[in-house]
Structures are given as C-alpha cells and as structure tokens.
Image (spheres, coloured by chain):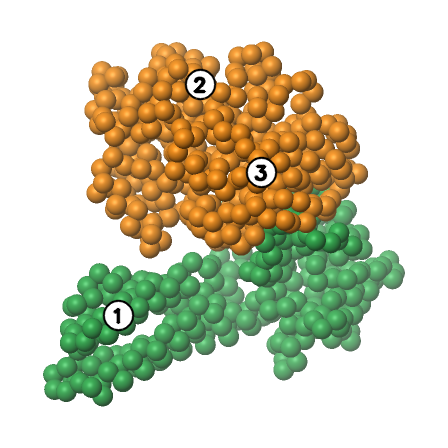
C-alpha cells in the first residue's frame, strides 16, 4: 500500500509499504477514506520531536471503513463500519483512561521507558508521532491498524460526509478542550494565540461555552479573516499591532480572563531579536521549544486568570515568566486532547448542525501529493489552513 | 538463600512510617558531581573560549580554538550522559574517553610551544592527568558497583487498576508468568508447590530449574525459590497491596540471585541479559498491560511489545512485511 513516510527533517515521501495486520485481539484494520495533515505534524517535519526514524509512517488524523477485526474488538464494531479514529491510543481500562484522561493512557505506549527519560512519566501512544510516543504507524496511508479499536474508533452511523466528522479525530476535540480548560464564566473574555485549525475551533468552542468575547491573535491575514467570519472572533495581527497593548486596551486594563496557547513549539515573534534568541537556542538544541505565545499569554492574562496550553510542546523552554505567573495567581492547565472524552458530544453537535467543522478545509488532494500538501501547509502558501488527503 | 546482603543497603523510614531499604548511591554521587562539573566546564569553554585558550596556553593557534569548541560541546555531552539517566552507568566512561583525547591534544600542543605558553600548557596537562585519574576511578566504581548491586537484588513495582485478588490469582498460576516475563519460555506446575521453569538464553540455548513456593498468603504475597542444584540459584517474592483511595493494587517484586561467584556474572547474563533491573521493570509493565487490557501493547516499531533493551534498535514504524506467528 501507499503511505506517507518521514525520511529526514523537511523530507517526506509517499512510499510503498506493507499492509497492516492484526497484531492483537482488540485491533481493527481500517481502510482509510480521509486523513489530514496537522499542525503538530510540522514539528515532526522540522525535526523538533526526537526519536523519529527514517521510514516512519506519518499521520494521526484519519477515518475510514473497518475491513478486519480482532476477535476481542467485535463487541460494538463490525466489518464495514465507518469510523473516525482518535489520535491518542488508549486502552480504556487503566486508571487514567477511566478518569477520562485518554491521552495519558498507561498501557498504550510500548516505548514508555524512552518517554520516561525525557518526561518523567510517559503519555499515551500516538499514531505516526515518534517512537518515544509508541512507534505506531500513522494514517496518512491507505490502511491503518487501530489498537484497542473498541475505545479508539468512533462509529459514524449516519450519512454525514467525511469532511464534517474527520476532525473529531483531533483538532475539533483539541480546540474544544482548550476552551473547556478555561472554565468560562458569564461575561468572560478569552484570548486565543494562533488561528490555525485548533485556534479556530478553540474560538468557536469558547463562544459555545458562553464566552462574551473571543480575541484571536495571528500574523496571517487570511486565517484571521476566516476566524472573524466563521467564528465571530475579534482579531489582532501581531505583526501590525503590539499584542499586550491591544489586549490591555480591548479589556480596559483587566486583561483577558483566559488565554489559550494554540501555537506551541514553533511560535513566531514580531520582534526579530526575540525570535532569533529562541530560534538560535533551538538550533543548537539548548532549548527545544520556542514559547513566544506562552510567554505572551502569561503576561497578558488578567490577575487570577487561566492559561490553557493546547499547542504542542516537545521538551524544555527558557525564560518562562514564572514571577508573573506566581505573583498574579494564575492557573495553567494543559494536555493533549482526551479525544475519546469529547467526541460523542461533539458528534451530537455536528449532527444538530451547531458546528460544521468542514469550513477549515482549504485543500483536498490525493495521497500521492502529500509532500506538496506539507509544503504549502508549512509555508502558508495558497491560503492553506487544512489539507485533507484522499487515498 | 534467605540471607540478604547488607552491603550498600541501608534503611530509611518514609513519610508513611514504612521502613524501606535503599541502596547506597556513593559512586553514583561522584558520577553526578562529575556530570555537573562537565556542564560547568562545557558552558565556560563555549562562552569564554579566548580566555580559556589563554589560560591553557594555546591562545596563539586557530586550530586550538576549534579544538576547544569541540571539547566544550563534548563536555556538554558528558554532562548529559552523566546527569540524565537515573543511574549514571556507562556515561562515566565517556568522560574517560574524552580525557584521553584532551591529554593527547595537550601533549601534541606542548611540542610546539615554548616559554610561558609551554609552562601554562604543562599545568593544564597535569590538571588533565589528575582529572583523568578521578574520572577513571568514578567510572570503574559506577559500572562495577552498578553491575554487582543490580544483579544481586532487583526490586520493582507497579500499580495495577485491578483488585489484589485478581492480581494474586493471575500470578499464583505460575504458568501465566511467561505471558509477561519475556525471558521465560515456560513454567510448568509439577506438584502442588513445585514448578519447572525454562528460560531462554542467548544463542538458542536454554536454562532450566525447579522452584518451590516457600510462603503463600492469599491475595497478599507469594515467595518462591529455586530448589538445590539450579544453575543460578534464585528466589523471589511478590507482594500485592491495595493502593490507597481505591487506586488499584501496588505490586512489588523483589528478586535475589545467588551471592556473586566466578560463574555468577556469566550465568546470570545468560538468563537475564545485561540489565536485570530493566528486565523486571519491563516484565511488570507487561503484567499491568495483560491484567488491565488482556493484551501486550504492540506497535509497528515495537512489534514484540515493551522491551527497553530493543528500543535503541527499533525498526521504523511501518506495518510488518510478514504476519507474525
Ligand atoms: Zn493533529
Ligand atoms: Zn488506558
């Protein structure tokens, strides 16, 4: 079958690889009908997530049709079912899964010891997302193996098109969880750094959860335009406006009640000097992340407010404004999305027409063209926001 | 067997008032200190290369600047090797190797230096020789001490989201052990309390021995030991303690092997490979997987499941070419 393989930093290729097989009783094999390129795939592309190997199959956002089932996965699933697959691989049985913390499943990462060296404790396995996170083949392919399919595959029973349900695999629940972590109260103003798919859905969800105003910060005009038109958010282009000043002004000095970092490790900064500082340290691997958005979020947030970190970080950061964070009674919450906790209620909202996540798709292409997709997505060419791949 | 080595073991009382034995970290402490020393040296060398060059007496050469920079970067590497792993094992030897390189570089440089520079270089070389001696001592201590202690006695624990009854029942059926203990080929019950164990050894060989249950407290603890005549006399115990607040069961395993003898190291390596500690940690992780999910987590990069020793040489995360037997 064909699959998108990671070759080296900034080098992906569509290659011929073996078809997946059932390895465990709870596995399913899914014939993929749609998959997507995600912002966090760019961290792999740029080589900032350690433990990638030449030939690793990429992709953690995918859906398709079940073509094979292990004997223990037949409860509730059958061959021919249309399913969306959650990016965190979760067993459903461990203490974390049972608390709804699926992205820190204690059993799904066979390489937990590597992750423990880097992080102290290991998070769950993720499809196509380095060996530290399990060494699972991803879904930018024609077929994929889904372990613990009874937990990790959501059946889509009506005729909603792929485009409306595909993002239940990651970016929609991720954006929703970002907003939910803000614990939004009536009258709250929420600021969101990043107008990519996750930032867009975080803004949308913040309104759904009762925010009074949502302000989105980015530097690409087309993404800001989209979040204003589709979500009704106010916008700040940080290359044109000083973010801290603008937020202070928009909130009459208070600062946003909650700040969402939907940028993560590869943030940009309007100040070339500050950008260069982190970029240089990252280049020699002294610092693994560029936490511009996070720093700004902490400094902007109102006293006693909440920072919600959903952007992906890989390792260590420098110059975290701890003094501001501590002295001003801020709260920080974070996590990879616990997709399986959110996808049923979100599917309900999609079905009722309250959310139509398909608007973020700007490009649909054939699997063979994935390298081009990565290219335009990474370089924000052709007003690219989300690429959907069709095997 | 019952006798326990008390060398390098002291006991501490933790916050819950439970007395625990801990292993001495004396040589580990020295390795850690050297790790911090490397970090300081690396950062200083990289940040103040000209000054360091002057101090060593090689400030007149361009090559020396490059060599110094390389040495600085290398020191950072030593620091990482010594500070990041929880036990500084072979990391200490990276410093020794580096010292040898430095000594070689400084003696070479000395041949081309005269006067004041030569004098400063000579001080540097003597200092390097001193550091090499300390590093050599630390490396020998850490690796030798580490190996003996790790082999003599291995302890590991895991928390499982099942009742103590379930965990006890599964373990008590010794024939289940090969399902999660990867070095075991089979365990066969040959009597009420007696079992026959077969373990895989490198090069297709196997080691076999008989074991008997010594103590058995239902839902709490099982203790077993090999009967006389085993190639590697060994004993072990597993305790099942309900975790506070309904958090499942804490499973604590304690294995002990025959006191070190000439044959011991080789025989042990045959059965358990180089790292019995890692082996038992992996076994417990798989025990948790089997108890909680009914299967061993397998990925495309690790089709055989959790196995820390194989992680460095993992295959790419691509589906397997052949169906697995
Ligand atoms: Zn994603
Ligand atoms: Zn789990």
Q: Quadrant of the C terminus of chain A?
A: top right
Residue tagged 1: B66
* Residue A47 shows in this picture: yes
Asked if residue B118 is positioned above or below residue B71 in the image, the reply reads below
State the residue at coordinates (69%, 27%).
A82
Question: Which residue is under mark 2?
Answer: A204
Quadrant assignment, res B277 = bottom right
Q: Residue furthest left?
A: B116
Q: Are marks 2 and 1 in contact (CB under 8 Å)?
A: no
Question: Is A62 located above or below residue A120 in the figure?
Answer: above
Which shade of the palette goes to chain A? orange
Secondary structure type for disc 2: helix
Judged left or right of residue B124, residue A64 is right
Label total for image: 3
Choose the circle earlier in sequence order: 2 or 3: 2
Q: Colour of chain B?
A: green
Name the secondary structure under disc 3. helix
Q: Position of residue A247 (x, y in %)?
A: 26, 22
The answer for which chain carries disc 1 is B
Q: Which mark is residue A69?
A: none
A63 relative to B269, above or below: above
Q: Where does residue B3 sit, x and y in percent of width and height?
A: 64, 69
User: In this view of the protein, which residue sits in the foreground, A19 or A104?
Assistant: A19
Residue under numbered circle 3: A367
C-alpha separation, residue under disc 2 versus residue under disc 3: 29 Å
Kind of element beneath mark 1: helix
C-alpha distance separating marks 3 and 1: 47 Å
| Residue shown at 58% from the left, 38% from the top | A367
- Which chain does tag 2 point to? A
When asked about the image quadrant of residue B112, the answer is: bottom left
């Amino acid at each position: 079958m064909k699959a998108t393989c990671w070759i080296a930093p900034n080098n992906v290729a569509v290659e011929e690889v073996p078809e997946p097989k059932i390895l465990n009783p709870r596995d399913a094999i899914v014939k993929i009908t749609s998959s997507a390129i995600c912002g966090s795939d760019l961290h792999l592309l740029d080589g900032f997530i350690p433990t990638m190997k030449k030939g690793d199959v990429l992709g953690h956002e995918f859906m398709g049709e079940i073509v094979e089932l292990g004997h223990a996965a037949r409860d509730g699933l059958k061959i021919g079912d249309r399913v969306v697959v959650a990016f965190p691989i979760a067993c459903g049985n461990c203490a974390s899964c049972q608390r709804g913390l699926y992205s820190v499943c204690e059993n799904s990462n066979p390489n937990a010891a590597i992750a423990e060296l880097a992080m102290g404790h290991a998070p769950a396995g993720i499809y196509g997302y380095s060996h530290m996170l399990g060494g699972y083949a991803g879904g930018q392919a024609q077929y994929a193996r889904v372990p613990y399919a009874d937990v990790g595959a959501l059946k889509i029973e009506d005729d909603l098109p792929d485009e409306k349900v595909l993002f239940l695999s990651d970016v929609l629940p991720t954006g929703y969880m970002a907003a939910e972590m803000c614990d939004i109260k009536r009258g709250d103003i929420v600021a969101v750094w990043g107008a990519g798919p996750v930032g867009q859905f975080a803004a949308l969800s913040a309104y759904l959860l009762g925010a009074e105003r949502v302000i989105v910060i980015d530097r690409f005009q087309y993404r800001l335009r989209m979040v204003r038109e589709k979500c009704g958010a106010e916008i700040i282009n940080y290359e044109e406006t000083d973010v801290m000043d603008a937020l202070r002004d928009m909130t009459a000095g208070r600062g946003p009640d909650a700040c969402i970092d939907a940028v993560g490790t590869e943030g940009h900064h309007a100040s070339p000097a500050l950008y260069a500082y982190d970029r240089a340290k990252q280049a020699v691997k002294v610092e693994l992340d560029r936490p511009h958005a996070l720093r700004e979020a902490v400094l902007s947030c109102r006293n006693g407010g909440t920072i919600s970190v959903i952007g992906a970080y890989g390792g260590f950061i420098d110059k975290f404004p701890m003094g501001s964070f501590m002295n001003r009674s801020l709260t920080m919450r974070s996590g990879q999305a616990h997709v399986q906790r959110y996808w049923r209620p979100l599917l309900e909202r999609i079905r009722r027409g309250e959310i139509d996540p398909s608007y973020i798709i700007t490009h649909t292409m054939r699997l063979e063209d994935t390298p081009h997709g990565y290219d335009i997505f990474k370089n924000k060419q052709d007003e690219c926001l989300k690429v959907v791949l069709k095997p | 067997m019952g006798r326990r080595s008390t060398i390098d073991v002291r006991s501490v009382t933790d916050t819950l008032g439970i007395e625990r034995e801990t292993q001495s970290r004396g040589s580990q402490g020295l390795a850690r200190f050297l790790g911090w020393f490397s970090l300081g040296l690396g950062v200083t060398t990289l940040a103040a290369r000209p000054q360091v060059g002057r101090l060593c007496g090689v400030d007149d050469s361009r090559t020396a600047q490059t060599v110094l920079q390389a040495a600085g970067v290398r020191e950072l590497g030593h620091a990482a090797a010594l500070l990041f792993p929880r036990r500084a094992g072979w990391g200490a030897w990276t410093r020794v190797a580096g010292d040898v390189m430095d000594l070689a570089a400084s003696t070479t440089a000395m041949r081309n230096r005269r006067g004041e520079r030569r004098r400063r270089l000579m001080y540097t070389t003597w200092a390097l020789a001193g550091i090499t001696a300390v590093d050599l001592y630390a490396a020998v201590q850490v690796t030798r001490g580490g190996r003996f202690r790790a082999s003599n006695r291995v302890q590991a624990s895991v928390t499982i989201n099942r009742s103590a009854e379930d965990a006890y029942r599964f373990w008590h059926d010794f024939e289940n052990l090969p399902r999660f203990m990867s070095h075991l080929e089979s365990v066969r019950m040959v009597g009420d309390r007696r079992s026959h164990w077969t373990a895989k050894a490198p090069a297709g060989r196997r080691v076999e021995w008989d074991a008997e249950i010594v103590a058995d407290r239902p839902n709490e603890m099982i203790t077993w030991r090999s009967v006389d005549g085993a190639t590697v006399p060994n004993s072990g115990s597993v305790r099942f303690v309900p975790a506070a607040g309904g958090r499942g069961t804490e499973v604590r395993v304690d294995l002990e092997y025959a006191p070190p003898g000439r044959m011991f190291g080789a025989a042990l390596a045959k059965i358990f490979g180089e790292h019995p500690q890692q082996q038992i940690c992996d076994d417990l992780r798989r025990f948790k997987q089997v108890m909680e999910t009914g299967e061993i987590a397998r990925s495309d990069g690790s089709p055989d499941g959790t196995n820390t020793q194989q992680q460095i040489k993992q295959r790419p995360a691509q589906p397997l070419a052949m169906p697995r037997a």
